[in-house]
Amino acid sequence: MSDGTLDEAYERLHRTGPEFEGWLSNHGPMAVEALARHGHQQRVHRWLDDYLGRLDELPRGLHPITDWRSALGDAKRAGDWLAYFDRQLREHPWRDVLGTWWPRLLPGIAAGATHGVIRVGHAVRALETDDQTPPRLTELGQALGYWAARWQPVPGAGRMPADRSVDPSAGPEQMDVDAALAGLPRIDDQSGGVRDRLRRLPGVPRWEPALAALRPARSPAEAEKGLTALVHRAGLNYLRFGHAEPVMLVHAVTAPTAVLRTLPALDRALWAPSLAAAWAATAAMTSVYAPADGIAPPLVTAATPAEVFARAARHGDAHVVKLADAVLDAHAASGDDRLLAAPGYAGQLI
């Protein structure tokens, strides 16, 4: 990604706002980072040529952020938040800014249907593995600003036992991600947008017990292992449930992927709460969008990881590209070839 294509793409995108047509998320920065990451730089600008026309201009600020707590989740302050983080990243090292704001933003992981944290994850990866160029720092600032402006908790997550102390010397109880996901209830009325659906979760009697079913991580290593398992299982679940909501169920995979990618840039003390928040996000997206009963995974032609991403890039939809990017990470970690079917399946559905 060092040929400058990603920075050029970021510069084009940073004249646009984080949302368009009301509150649809601007997927441009995430998609171009994934395309460049997987060696498809030649597609980046052509993809942007088609995408930029639908986007809104960068929002104007109202007044500077002074009391950040009262401004969290205030979408009218989006321009103020973008300006705030632009200034922070000019004045402080990016890891310091991220380390300060990650625990503040994490409880609001549902922001923008989880696009806030997803965009941050892509921005952090660009900074972690390549030059810390001004466009990449600007992208992290815009990602953090979007998350802050749309900050939204998952209902019931504040009452999860993630903050309780866990005895590291306790018995060898396994963190069973598969069982926790399998035990999630569904909202009865799966209609409307994500905000309407999330508001229905407190009315589901089994929701909070199911949310608490995944016990807290006892160590940073266990948190990383739990996140890896969560991304893996969520990717497989897309094959069972994706037909019901092909776009929105992508986020059950890409949100925890973004958190997992950000861990290396964070203090290890933040890893366990990061798993708890990622679990809440995936659980919520599953409960409000997935049907109660899944279908048999589709049969697909065998392909290499590179071929899987190339097909997603040719398809061109941002969600297909981002899902391919996420499941290739999961495949690299697990070697589970079943995951490679998910992007092609999404491409058929979207």
Image (cartoon, rainbow, N blue to C red):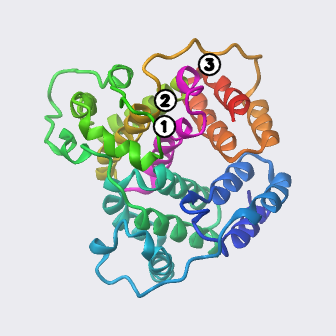
Q: Position of residue 83 (x, y in %)?
A: 49, 81
Q: Earlier in the sequence, mark 3 or mark 1?
A: 1
Q: CA distance from mark 3 to mark 2?
A: 12 Å
Q: Secondary structure at mark 3?
A: helix
Looking at the image, residue 89 sits to the left or right of residue 267; the answer is right
Q: Secondary structure at mark 2?
A: helix
**Nearest to the observer: residue 284 or residue 88:** 284
Helix, strand or loop: magenta stretch: helix
* As drawn, 1 above or below 218: below
Looking at the image, residue 65 sits to the left or right of residue 349; the answer is left
Magenta stretch: give its range: 238-266
Report the amino acid beneath label 3.
Arg
- Would you say the residues marked 2 and 1 are in contact, meaning their CB atoms lie under 8 Å apart? yes
Report if residue 175 lies within the magenta region. no
**Nearest to the observer: residue 333 or residue 319:** 319
Report the amino acid beneath label 1.
Ala
Identified at 32% across, 21% down, the residue is 183
Tag shown at residue 234: 2
Please name the residue that numbered disc 3 is placed on.
Answer: 338
Where the C terminus falls, by quadrant?
top right
Looking at the image, residue 28 sits to the left or right of residue 227; the answer is right
Report if residue 252 lies within the magenta region. yes
Q: Earlier in the sequence, mark 2 or mark 1?
A: 2
Which of the 4 quarters of the picture holds residue 17?
bottom right
Please name the residue that numbered disc 1 is placed on.
Answer: 252
Q: Position of residue 92 (x, y in %)?
A: 44, 78
Looking at the image, residue 254 sits to the left or right of residue 188; the answer is right
Q: Secondary structure at mark 1?
A: helix
At label 3, counting other C-alpha atoms closer than 10 Å, the crowd grade (few under 14, some 14-19, many 20 or more) is some
Q: Is residue 11 visible?
A: yes
Which of the 4 quarters of the picture holds residue 265?
bottom left
* As drawn, 138 above or below 293: below
